[in-house]
Image (cartoon, rainbow, N blue to C red):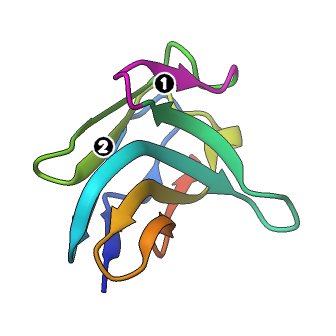
Amino acid sequence: QVQLVESGGGLVQPGGSLRLSCAASGNIVTIYEKAWYRQTPGNQRELVATILTSGATIYANSVRGRFTISGDNVQKTVYLQMTSLRPADTAVYYCNFDAVDLNRGRANIWGQGTPVTVSS
């Protein structure tokens, strides 16, 4: 079974940086898009950044210029470099793959989430 495992979350002061990592295990045949989402209590999960099949990247307005998404389809990884962090960035961050799983076909695959807290 395909699994995504995130790491790198934690507590950081405003203005600080964190790098989130996400690695996939299992039988992924093809990866189309990779993305990071975040969610705060009582709110819907929101898109933070995504890498399209073309390699182009898209960012939420609130993080553009501060966050950088990168990844490798061969290594089945995606990263989110976060700089100039703000308290408003506090959330649980989830990685997401739009990919073909050998066992279930094309699927939207989610990690378990990693918490990020920005506070002094």
Quadrant of the rendering where the N terminus is positioned: bottom left
Residue 78 highlighted magenta (yes or no): no
Is disc 1 surrounded by few (<14), some (14 to 19) or many (20+) residues within 10 Å? some
Seen at 41% across and 18% down, the residue is: 56
For residue 42, side relative to residue 57 (left or right)? right
- Which quadrant of the figure has residue 25? bottom left
For residue 89, side relative to residue 1 (left or right)? right
First along the sequence among labels 2 and 1: 2
Q: Main secondary structure of the magenta part?
A: loop
- Which quadrant of the figure has residue 11? bottom left
What residue occupies the far top of the structure in this picture?
Answer: 65
Q: Find residue 71 and report its horizontal and vertical position in percent.
A: 25, 38
- Looking at the image, do the residues carrying marks 2 and 1 touch, with CB atoms under 8 Å apart? no
Mark number for residue 40? none
Amino acid under label 2?
Answer: Tyr
Q: Is residue 83 above or below residue 92?
A: above
- Which quadrant of the figure has residue 92? bottom right
Q: Find residue 8 and report its horizontal and vertical position in percent.
A: 31, 57
- Magenta segment, which residues? 53-61
Q: Find residue 91 and report its horizontal and vertical position in percent.
A: 63, 56
Residue indicated by mark 1: 84
Mark number for residue 79? 2
Q: Nearer the viewer, residue 115 or 48?
A: 48
Q: Is residue 5 above or below residue 71?
A: below
Residue 60 highlighted magenta (yes or no): yes
Q: Secondary structure at mark 1?
A: loop
Q: Find residue 83 and report its horizontal and vertical position in percent.
A: 42, 27
